[in-house]
Each structure stands twice: as C-alpha cells, then as structure tokens.
Image (cartoon, grey):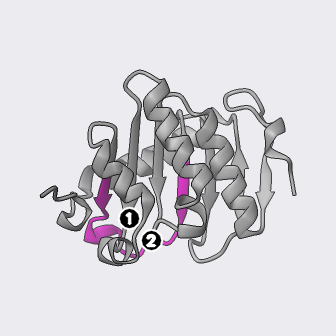
Amino acid sequence: MDNFDDYKLAVTSKLIELESCEENRLAVTCMAQQCTRTLDIISRLLDPPIFDSTGFIEAVRQLVVRYRNPLIRVIVFDPETIVGHGHRLVDLAGDLTSFIQIRKVSSEYNDYNECLLIADSVGYIHRKHADRYEATVNFNDRRQSKHLQKGFEGMWETAIPDPNLRRVNL
C-alpha cells in the first residue's frame, strides 16, 4: 500500500492502482485534505467505509472553513437508503448548504456503476465498478480529470435535489 502522504495534489503525476477499501479510504481522505476549491463525487450509496469516515468528514469540514467559496457536489443513486442508515456527509451538507450540494442521479444514468472523486479539477480517484475497490488514482492529471469532469457535469446537470437529503429544522 502506498503512503499517500508522499502525494501532493496538483504536483504528483503518478498513476496509482488501489485494491482495497482501506486504500480507497486513505486516498480519498488524503486528496480531500489537500483540496482547496472543488470536490465532485459520484457514489451510488456514498460508500460509508470511505465517505463516512472521520478523516474524510473532517477534511470536507476543513475545506469549507479554510478556503473561500469552495464547492462540494455529490451525486447519489439511493438517497432513501443513505439517509436511513445515517451518513455524516449528509448531516454536514444540511449544516453547510451553501457549500455542499447533494443530488439524486436522473433516471437516464441509473445504469452508471462507477465511483468517482475529482479534486480541484486536477486529481481523481476512479473505480470503474462501484461495488469493487479496484481504483485508479492520480493527484495531478489534468487531462484525465478534465475528461472525468465532463462526464460528471453531464450527470450533475440532469441530477435533481431530493427531499430525503434536506434537513428539516424544528
């Protein structure tokens, strides 16, 4: 397993292959910790072992606190299940609605079965099969990140806000 502390967002151009949940969690957390502007995520159920980890949630919180006008956009497939099981990213989005947006994928993308994180439009973590942990990671690949970003933008434009993801304060 790689020590992700040696990789720098927008600096280190090395393709990394991941195989385990733990490697994915470490890579996602490290990339989010280094992010300063945008974080785009596509995840069917917001993979709790990865996106509900303490390190990742704190990295997202720090992104919002430290930097000017960051934007975190998340596309999910089954908001009811995510909310039903409880997820700290959904809770955080409820607290920071100006910075974190979560939408439900539109029906035209229901067959999409990948998991993706793009940080500052330069680094990415991409799993071609959402239900497996084999992934490719690069902390500095503008070309591939741009290609992945284009696909994300297409999905984002058709994704819809879901009432399950809104916090109701009483």
Q: Residue lying furthest front in this view?
A: 170
20 relative to 47 in the view: left or right: right
Number of numbered discs? 2
Residue indicated by mark 1: 76
Q: In the image, residue 56 lies at what x, y percent?
A: 58, 50
Q: Amino acid at mark 2?
A: Leu
Question: Is disc 2 in contact with disc 1, using a CB cutoff of under 8 Å?
Answer: yes
Residue that appears at 47% across and 64% down? 43
Where is residue 81 drawn, in percent x and y? 36, 78
Image quadrant holding the N terminus, namely bottom right
Q: Is any atom of residue 30 visible in this view?
A: yes
Residue 52 lies in the magenta-colored region: no
Element marked by disc 1: strand
Above or below, 29 against 132 in this view is above
Pointer 2 residue: 45
Query: Is residue 55 positioned above or below 77 on the image?
Result: above
Label 1 crowd (10 A; few <14 / some 14-19 / many >=20): many
Q: Position of residue 120 (x, y in %)?
A: 53, 33
The residue under the point 34% across, 74% down is: 78
